[in-house]
Image (tube, grey):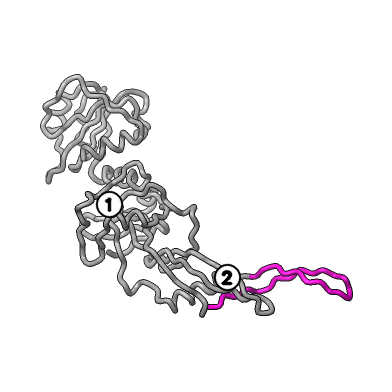
């Protein structure tokens, strides 16, 4: 976790200067001194000591905070804690102390947002496969991962949490598997004129939608994360795909005609309709950013980054 925090701060051009001496404060490790913090508006005007507290079963107590405050230098501090920490443990600190505390929930969301922003690139060792969980996760090797298109997220986790009262939870960024369909076929216009066309669509089995795809949707420099695959029953068959695509492929086009007797030029809309029997289909997997939500009672859900809805895992 310490390395992750340092990597995020470094990506956000926050340099950590080492403290003048090593502090032997049980449970608290000083990562360094930051001159400016983009993530903390309250402390953006002067240097801040950054502390990390490793995971443990029990929350941080008032006694631990008081012991830390005796040896902690300066009076401006940011504590990133993997242990639960509440505001009431800070009540007995000196009046000139300004302390910002992030518990495990906020810390995990901060890391997740950094991953999906591209600030933090998470990679798997080339010789290590991703674990399979409950038959819905699939292994990814590096060569296939490089070929997979990632779509931009639409919503931010922090924005969703502000509008959805969900209590205490942990979050982990993941990708949802979708299909990028490459389709070619024939359009039939007026007087049986034929014209060849090509299209690309995203099939999202979680939203149960087929969506036109464009290069503007691509998330560049995407991290390597665990990918979640839906049940095979949720994918569309080719017949279902054709049914969904037909109203999206048919279109009306302006056609000009001349009336030789009256010398009048008129413009009208003529239908061009897809010949479903001519369609050829090919696909590769794509991936959509999401978050795995783990609630206090152990329940797990998936938060989709395109529609802000949660799905059972």
Q: Secondary structure at mark 1?
A: strand
Q: Secondary structure at mark 2?
A: strand
Q: Residue furthest right?
A: 262
Q: Circle 2 is placed at which residue position?
A: 196
In the shown orientation, is residue 160 left or right of residue 70? right
Using the image, tell me which numbered label, if any, was put on residue 6. none
Would residue 144 appear left or right of 53 to someone viewing this image? right
Dot in front, 2 or 1: 2
Q: Quadrant of residue 207?
A: bottom left
To which residue does mark 1 refer?
172
Indicate whether residue 127 is drawn in magenta. no
Residue found at x 16% / y 20%? 21
- Alpha carbons under labels 2 and 1: distance apart: 44 Å
Compared with 228, 85 (above or below) is: above
> Looking at the image, can residue 19 be seen?
yes
Magenta part, dominant SS: strand
Q: Residues within 10 Å of mark 1 (few under 14, many from 20)?
A: some
Which portion, as a residue range, is magenta? 252-276
Quadrant for the C terminus, please: bottom left
């Amino acid at each position: 976790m310490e390395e992750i925090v340092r990597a995020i701060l470094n990506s956000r051009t926050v340099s950590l200067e080492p403290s003048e001496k090593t502090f032997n404060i049980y449970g608290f490790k000083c990562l360094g001194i930051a001159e400016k913090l983009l993530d903390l508006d309250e402390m953006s005007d002067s240097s801040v000591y950054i502390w990390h507290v490793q995971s443990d079963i029990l929350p941080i107590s008032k006694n631990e905070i008081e012991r830390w405050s005796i040896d902690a230098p300066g009076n401006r501090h940011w504590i990133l804690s993997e242990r639960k920490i509440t505001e009431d443990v800070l009540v007995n600190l000196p009046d000139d102390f300004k302390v910002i505390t992030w518990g495990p929930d906020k810390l995990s969301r901060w890391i997740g947002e950094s991953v999906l922003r591209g600030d933090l690139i998470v990679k798997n060792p080339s010789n290590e496969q991703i674990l399979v969980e409950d038959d819905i996760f699939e292994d990814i090797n590096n060569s296939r991962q490089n070929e997979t298109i990632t779509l931009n997220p639409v919503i931010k986790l922090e924005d969703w949490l502000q509008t959805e009262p969900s209590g205490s939870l942990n979050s982990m960024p993941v990708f949802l598997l979708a299909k990028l369909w490459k389709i070619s076929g024939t359009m039939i216009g007026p007087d049986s004129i034929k014209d060849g066309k090509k299209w690309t669509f995203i099939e999202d089995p979680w939203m149960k939608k087929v969506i036109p795809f464009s290069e503007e949707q691509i998330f560049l420099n995407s991290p390597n994360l665990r990918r979640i695959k839906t049940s095979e029953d949720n994918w569309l068959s080719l017949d279902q795909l054709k049914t969904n695509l037909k109203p999206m492929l048919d279109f009306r086009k302006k056609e000009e005609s001349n009336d030789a007797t009256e010398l009048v030029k008129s413009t009208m809309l003529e239908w061009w309709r897809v010949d479903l029997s001519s369609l050829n289909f090919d696909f590769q997997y794509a991936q959509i950013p999401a978050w795995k939500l783990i609630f206090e009672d152990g329940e797990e859900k998936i938060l989709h980054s395109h529609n802000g809805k949660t799905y059972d895992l």
